[in-house]
Image (cartoon, grey):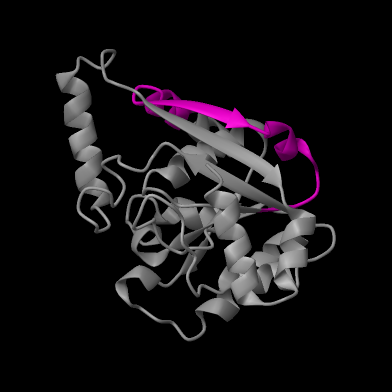
């Protein structure tokens, strides 16, 4: 079902986005994978997961404000998605780090691929900042030997209606989807301008583990340098 859903999502997204994927051969390995993507806009998880499902599968770690949406909550539960507190709005669940780590490692035991955003929120500028976020560091620091760490560099979405570029604030997802639908109709669907998006998958297993040894700050700087390469 998820494969079919991802295919349908790609068809819809193709109206508005031209997506180029680099390093897709990494996705075809059998070992469980920890995907660590940057987060330019609210739409990038949808784009990323729909592309991952072309080659493999993955379970996302999702903020509670999206996980709890009535129309999709049942599906997120069914696919084993990990629900976490919405840190962007100030909700601080004291057990959130423990909960994330426990759920992610349970997924690895089931040979499940996991997607987690180290920044925990969409970028507030044209580049990625992890700040003092801890989840990715704690997971990589004690990750099982058989798990592959894959960095995901997404470019082309900063400046879109789903990013913070215009207002400096996180946009309302439902409102932006409605706007996008109206814009598409206004452009007679097939004449809609397309945004160029590139997704690069890179095996960073060795580098991630090495940069986790000095501590959280060094690890987060390593990830920022990876994401902001271009």
> Height in image: 82 above or below 58?
below
Picture coordinates of residue 138, whole percent (x, y): 65, 74
218 sits left or right of 20 in the view: right
Picture coordinates of residue 119, whole percent (x, y): 48, 63
Instruction: Give 30 or 123, whichever is nearer the viewer.
Output: 123
Magenta stretch contains residue 21: yes
Residue at x 34%, y 23% (from the top left corner): 194
> Height in image: 57 above or below 130?
above
> Height in image: 103 above or below 201?
below
Instruction: Give 111 or 160, whichever is nearer the viewer.
Output: 160
68 sits left or right of 34 in the view: left
Count numbered badges in the picture.
0
Residue at x 47%, y 86% (from the top left corner): 94
Query: What residue span does the magenta drawing correspond to?
Result: 8-34
Magenta stretch contains residue 102: no
Residue at x 40%, y 56% (from the top left corner): 73
Residue 148 appears in view: no
136 sits left or right of 177 in the view: right
Q: Quadrant of residue 188?
A: top left
């Amino acid at each position: 079902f998820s494969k079919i859903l991802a295919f349908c999502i790609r068809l819809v997204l193709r109206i508005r986005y031209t997506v180029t994927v680099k390093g897709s051969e990494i996705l075809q390995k059998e070992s469980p994978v920890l995907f660590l993507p940057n987060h330019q806009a609210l739409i990038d998880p949808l784009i990323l997961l729909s592309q991952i499902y072309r080659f493999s599968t993955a379970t996302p770690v999702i903020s509670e404000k999206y996980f709890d949406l009535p129309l999709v909550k049942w599906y997120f539960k069914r696919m084993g998605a990990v629900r976490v507190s919405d840190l962007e709005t100030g909700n601080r669940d004291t057990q959130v780090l423990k909960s994330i780590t426990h759920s992610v490692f349970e997924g690895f035991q089931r040979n499940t691929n996991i997607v987690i955003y180290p920044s925990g929120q969409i970028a507030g500028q044209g580049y990625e900042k992890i700040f003092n976020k801890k989840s990715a560091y704690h997971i990589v620091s004690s990750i099982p030997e058989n798990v592959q760490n894959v960095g995901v560099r997404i470019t082309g979405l900063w400046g879109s209606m789903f990013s913070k570029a215009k207002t400096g604030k996180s946009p309302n997802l439902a409102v932006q989807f409605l706007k996008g639908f109206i814009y598409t109709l206004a452009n007679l669907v097939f004449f809609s301008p397309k945004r160029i998006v590139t997704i690069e998958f890179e095996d960073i297993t060795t580098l991630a583990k090495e940069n986790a040894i000095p501590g959280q700050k060094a690890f987060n700087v390593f990830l920022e340098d990876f994401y902001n390469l271009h």
